[in-house]
Image: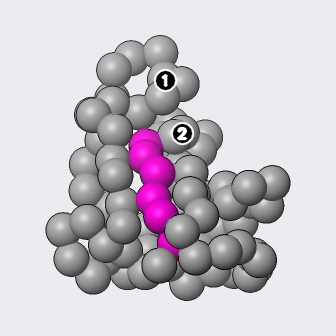
């Protein structure tokens, strides 16, 4: 389950967050682990991510989701592992 913020965090100008697109590169932070993955949207608020490096996490854990904006990864939302 994915919850997107209205605006991206950490940018000088206010950047509106758009929906996650197919094959988009995302950075995920799960606890202390950080990994990058490719997004595959399933529905309006659900996304499946194919990770480049697997992480160990429990079901129900929160995940910070970042997108590349202006050459850097910026926080755009969070999700829950199902």
Q: Secondary structure at mark 2?
A: strand
Q: Position of residue 60 (x, y in %)?
A: 54, 68
Q: Do the numbered discs 2 and 1 sit on residues whose CB atoms are within 8 Å?
A: yes
Judging by the rendered image, the residue that carries numbered circle 2 is: 74
Callout 1: helix, strand or loop? Answer: loop
Question: Magenta segment, which residues?
Answer: 76-81
- Name the one closer to the observer, 22 or 65: 65
Q: Residue at x 25, y 56 (%)?
A: 19
Please check the rendered image and state whether residue 77 is part of the magenta-colored stretch, yes or no.
yes
Which residue is at the front of the view, 65 or 70? 65
Magenta span: predominant SS is: strand
Q: Residues within 10 Å of mark 2 (few under 14, many from 20)?
A: some
59 in relation to 44, above or below: below
Vertical arrangement, residue 24 with respect to residue 65, above or below: below
Q: Which residue is mark 1?
A: 11
Q: Position of residue 56 (x, y in %)?
A: 77, 77
**Figure coloring:** one colour
- Residue at screen point 36% across, 67% down: 1
Give whichever of 56, 29 is nearer the camera.
56
How much space separates mark 2 and mark 1, taking CA atoms? 8 Å
């Amino acid at each position: 389950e994915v919850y997107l913020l209205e605006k991206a965090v950490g940018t000088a100008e206010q950047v509106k967050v758009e929906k996650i697109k197919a094959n988009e590169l995302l950075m995920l932070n799960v606890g202390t682990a950080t990994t990058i993955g490719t997004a595959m949207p399933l529905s309006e608020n659900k996304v499946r991510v194919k990770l480049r490096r697997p992480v160990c996490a429990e079901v129900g854990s929160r995940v910070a989701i970042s997108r590349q904006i202006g050459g850097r990864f910026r926080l755009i939302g969070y999700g829950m592992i199902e």
